[in-house]
Amino acid sequence: MKDPVLSIKNLKIALPEGADRDFAVDDVTYDLFPGEILCIVGESGSGKSMSANAAMGLLPDLVRPVGGEIIFDGTDVLKLSEAEMMDLRGKKIAMIFQEPMSALNPLMRVEDQIAEVFEAHGLLTPKERAARAIELLTEVGIPDPQKAARAYPFQLSGGQRQRVMIAMALALEPRILIADEPTTALDVTTQAQILELIRNLQEKHGMAVMFITHDFGVVAEIADRVAVMQYGKIVEAGTADEVLDNPQHEYTQKLIAAIPKLAAEETEAPVGKTPILEVEGLNKTYVTGGGLFFSKPRVVHAVNDVNLTLCEGETLGIVGESGSGKSSVGRCLVRLMQPDSGTVKLAGHDMAQLSGDALREARKSIQMIFQDPYASLNPRSKVGRIIAEGPMAHGVSKQEAYARAVKLLELVDLDALAIDRYPHEFSGGQRQRIGIARALALEPRVIIADEAVSALDVSIQAQVLDLLADLKERLNLALIFITHDLRVAAQICDRIAVMQKGKVVEMGPAHAIFNNPQSDYTRTLIEAIPGREKELAAAG
Amino acid sequence: MLRFILMRLGKAAIILIAILTLNFFLIHAAPGDPAAVMAGEAGAADAKFIAQLREQFGLDKPLLTQLGIYLKGVLQFDLGYSYRQQMPVADLILDRLPATLLLTMTAFVISLVLGTAAGVLASARVGKWSDTAISTLALLFYATPLYWAALMAVLLFSVYFNWLPGFGYETVGANYTGFRRALDIGQHLILPATTLGLFFMAVYMRMTRASMLEVSQLDFVKTARAKGLKSGIIQRRHIFRNAMLPVVTLAGLQAGQLVGGAVLTETVFAWPGIGRLMFEALAQRDYNLLLGVFFVSAAMVLVFNLITDILYRFVDPRIRVA
Amino acid sequence: MLKRLTLLAAAFMVTTALHAEPVTGGRANVVIQPEPPSLMLGLVQNGPTQMVAGQIYEGLLRYDEKLQPMPQLAKSWEVSEDGLTYTFNLHDNVKWHDGEPFTSADVVFSADVFLRETHARLRTSLEHVESITAPDDTTVVFKLKQPFGPFLGIFEAGTMPMVPKHIYEGTEYKSNPANNTPIGTGPFKFAEWEKGSHILLTKFEDYYEDGKPYLDEIYWHVIPDAASRAVAYETGVVDILPGGSVENFDVQRIADMENTCITDKGWEYFGPLSWMWLNNREGPTADKRFRQAVMYAMDRNFARDALWNGLGKVSTGPVSSSTRFYTDDVNQYDYDPEKAKALLEEMGYDGETVRLLPLPYGETWQRWAEAVKQNLGEVGIDVEIVSTDVAGWNQKLAEWDYDMAFTYLYQYGDPALGVARSYISTNIAKGSQWNNVEGYENTEVDDLFAKAAVAVTAEERQKLYDEVQQKLVDDVPVAWLLELGFPTIYRCNVKDLVTTAIGVNDGFKDTYIEK
Amino acid sequence: MADFWKRFSRNRGAVIGLAILAIVVLVAILAPLLFPQSPWRMVQRPFLPPFAMDQYPLGTDALGRNVISGLAYGAQVSLLVGLVSTVAALLIGIPIGALAGYFGGWADDALMRFTEFFQTVPSFALAIVLVAIFEPSIQSIIAAIAIVSWPPVARLVRGEVLSLRSREYVEAAILSGQTSLTIILRQVLPNTISPIIVLASLMVATAILLESSLSFLGLGDPNLMSWGYMIGAARTVIRQAWWLSFFPGVAILLTVLALNLIGEGLNDALNPRLARRGK
């Protein structure tokens, strides 16, 4: 075995006072070898990106290393002066970040930002820098590199921006590339492309890559070796195959088990069941710009002639990438958004054109669960009131509404005492349960879950999905489940509608969609699911 | 770009007319009219004399007719005639405008340059004594009544030390010309411009400091550091430019408001500007003149807003292209 | 036949010549405050306009400090014995600033045509005039309908300025562009006016009095701020501060400076008298006892000392002591709060709030209102100060919307010109603040004023005016305050600055600066 | 609440500010007890310098009135005008901002044009015109200050409401059948309260400055002793009596400073996320 290019030994990083624990990283030791991709994997708050940031000398202000060492090139980088660190950064160790939106300076052209890397290390003439920038952009596979070089970041898509970041990182042929959740903010197809790019570049340049992620699917796609972190400690490390196929630590096992499996079960077709919700010819266009002073408006067809049917007791998944219009459909159904045309028949009555009291009444039967567990509960209301407000608005007495709230809390496995507490006293998963309780308070027949588990860590996600499935069964609900995550869709949905650019490109039973996709787009989507190949291989 | 400017000018014209209309009604709601004031000044007057003046000034017509006549004039770039001062309003304003612009623009530049410089300095030394000193000074400037600062400055620098002239636009009767005159005006300018600039200097300082610190937490700064850039370059190229965006917005607002807001300074320093003119016109119900001053100062606001927007488009590519 | 009274004025030339030989040349730096709206004295007669334009335009006469007429454009004049015909003989070598000759036709045009239209105050006096004629180029004859005692008092520049007929005849006076470059016959001509900064007048070389004026130019500094004006004097930027230029609080300090002279002369013609209008129509002020109580409650000596720097005099009644036919043989209202309280008790004053309108002319007046409010408060009168600007103040007075209101008025040398107007009941009319604003009605007083105006001899007039003063002081239609002293402050080497009853308003003709 | 105090008191400046303000408030309340005589009463010779007589530690003014008594009564006026005009500005600004932000569309357009319009009129000049026209009195001053200072409130509230209205809990409230009014009052506005409080504390400071500026120009309520009036009245005699303008100026400076410090403290305490960023 070769000598490690980076060696982290007994690293301890202290958090500022008042944090939930004393050390972000507690006695962590691992090596990074040349030419390998090491994945550091963990849930949010596990401290997975701290050691990498420490190696770059880029820790947040109040967070500082208090013990151990990080050996690079035979020296402890923790002991380097700022000037020496500057020489190291970008030249020997480069880094890319999670948010391609904010990681580029919005006011500078792409080529200037790339050229800066050479400038920082006093290399090349300005002209050569510009030429190199084009070469790099070409290498990372940006279409029309000349044009991209002249562009400002906001003119590029998320994937392109991440490619620009990679180009910058590659500029000086660093020995180590640190990738801190580089694909988390990207759509699944884009993610697949970026992962492939990183893999290819790593092979071509023989770099060592430290890849930080929370997603085991991604790990399966890219990792040579894996280190799993929990609460600032490495609980398990090994080759990708060892860890994924045969996890030793209980926590790793739990995490892997929580990943929704791709194999959708074959369910009975909803024949004979009565449709509860019928959507026909739904259209919605956005007009942006314009207004009082006659600027030219821009029209986006967010929902383009969508037809759906939802039967009692059924779960319909709507999947698609960002901008596909899947959320717009959901919002049109509950009339948080006014559709331009089309009918939304709820138990036979069209509610697309209702307004005022009639709409309020109709909405009782169709409720929604939201994505963000932090933004979906009013921080200034107690949980009891949050749940009871709906019934009270429909004339239920306060006493009765609160009594029902207590019952609902129990239904979602929360303590009844919760009614007197504020949302901020609960964790993300608990908050999502409160959100579910609120949706149930009006005794709806249809629930629309809009990315309801996307913001949750994978272990919590599994619990919430179980709860939803359970409630659906017990209360005979029909569920529309909107998600970008095909694994989740596969696990929970009976039928799936795939959306692209406002249109439903394919709809059918879940197993049929996964096993025998009819449209090219669906196929691309499914193939892009990280870890799919490995899973298929494992399945046999 | 041209289309954008034209559109903004059209919008500005509508706002201007609205402002004129509002002020027209406001000023006519006030007790007394210029005829009575002028009759009063003549030392004696009878009702017939006043009626004669009113007829002459067109004040006997219905209010809406008067408004119509006035606005029609304005649309033809005629701001009317000041009967009180026996001069066309435009001439009166143009007489005074240069002094006001000189004062306010100097104050503006002083406050912007010193304020942002101090803000950058403070942000670079967060928590150190120089940051504390600058921040404290900014707080003091922020809380000091402008006119009081002006008075104290006169007392100290003009009366006590006798370093700088304490009033006026230039040495009266000295009849300097050329460079000597510019120097003289410059000396007269120092105290009023500085005191007028104090408050906004504080605002810029605080805003720049906060904005610099905020931007320095953003991801792209981390990217820049990861490239191995020197912190000086990061400060200048990455943080400062982005941090200036809100400052530019504020500066545009301030520059516009300064013209109408210099009344106090002009009062204390006997500066022959628009602010004084407005105050006098108001007390004498010199309707056309007052409306004219409002027209000009509101136009200033709109012009500076437009300049800001254009500048902003220049600085921020997101707005330029979108 | 007419017996001619000829008043030759050569004697006055002698008095001014008593000083050392005048020095020719130099510039007078004078403060002007506020900036005049216009310099066309025929159209605008407010204080600042008259002060500057009084050097540009001239009247037929000037007046000495005893209010005796002196020659100006008229070198001599005669009055017929019946007091109905006034004949003026003009200088024959007078030129307008544009070189045109000045003739009797200009006088007739000015008095009979131009000023009758534009000059509200003069117009009233001219109602006594039957005809104005010009028998030849240097003679003008005014014929009156009936005798009018003060008639010889209306010929100074501010009251009857001579305007050039060749420029104004047949034009729209107010919008004549020549208004911006005034043309007069005075010792100085208009040179330059930078608004907000200064007005420059230069010597008129063709002036008809040989050797005059002595100064090369007068530079009027517009400094719209009292404190700054004081600084301007201290730093030597200006040499002359006409009355009212600096706040009264500053007068003493400046007067104490080296080479600084101060005089309160030069206001005799105006005889500025301050008082509070008391609304005689309604409220507590309708009660004579209340008005008397106000007189007793006010510490006018304190006001004079604290606010007017000890200058001026506590007024005894409606006529200023410098005005003709003044008498002090009237009831005296000394500061006596107890007496005031007693009067208030007698009338049964119930503490009703009275509104007090200060004069919006600056700090001194504001302070004065505050002091009066405090004085009245101490005898139990509840005063609320209503503050307003010049226009609002005019309006409120003209509409009688006040209880008490500060003011000061000029007397123009004669009770018939400047006093009667405020007390006679025929002068009660809304819409003006220059008439009987207080609403005082007393037929006896009306009669006395009417008789006194047309009485031919001075003795006769004195008797009638004594009587009317006594009656008015008893009734207190308004609360007289002070005869105001507006001190002119100047460098002592500026000589002969104040030589007439209107002081600097027409004084620069004689002024010279000693080196 | 305890948490609030902890965070507030961590800002040393804020605590100092609170102490200064407490003194000012106390003096204002106790003024009639400390100085039973009217501040307008002429008690000594004019222009008595400070520290010359124990009874009149800050001297007397041009009419021989007790300066320190004037300062005490002036505190009442400053605080009253500051508070009431701010409340009035909030009462105008919050509904306009809330309606514009919540309903969007043409209502937003119209209301924001209206707001923009008021921001385009030079505000101090407008205040002067308003006070002059309605004649200086405490009511007209408060009204004028409120009229020129509500636009920032409206913009702030609109911005907050705009971001809150797309918050998921607001959408949940819509789905649960609550009326717009209920949603605005119960879901949206309570969550804008922190920035509003911070802004309000700064507005009180600005209002005090505005009132003093108006009084300085002679547009104060002539029956109330205020700090700006004292400075304005002293301006012409500044050379012989510096103390007449000096002390009231210091009083304004300290009060406004105190309010600003408190505003910062409130910001730290109420918006901890923002505060941390600024540190």
Image (spheres, rainbow, N blue to C red):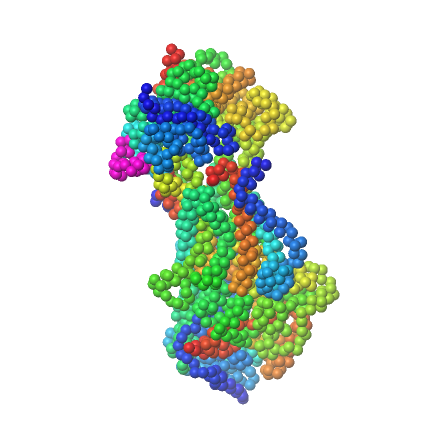
The N terminus of chain C: image quadrant: bottom right
Q: As displayed, is residue C395 above or below residue A214?
A: below
Name the spot of residue D126 as percent of width and height, x first. 50, 52
Q: As displayed, is residue A196 above or below residue C193?
A: above
Name the spot of residue A263 as percent of width and height, x first. 42, 14
Give the prevailing secondary structure in the magenta stretch: helix
- Labels in figure, total: 0
Based on the displayed image, in which of its 4 quarters is residue B193 positioned?
bottom left
Is residue A135 inside the magenta stretch? yes
Choose between A163 and D9: the one closer to the eye: D9
Residue, x 43% and y 61% (percent of image)?
B164
Q: As displayed, is residue C453 above or below residue B207?
A: below
Is residue C156 inside the magenta stretch? no
Residue, x 73% and y 66% (percent of image)?
C342
Choose between A313 and B291: the one closer to the eye: A313
Q: As displayed, is residue C320 above or below residue B121?
A: below
Regarding residue A411, the answer to whether it shows in the image is yes
Which span of residues is magenta-colored? A111-136
Residue, x 69% and y 63% (percent of image)?
C379
Regarding residue D61, the answer to whether it shows in the image is no
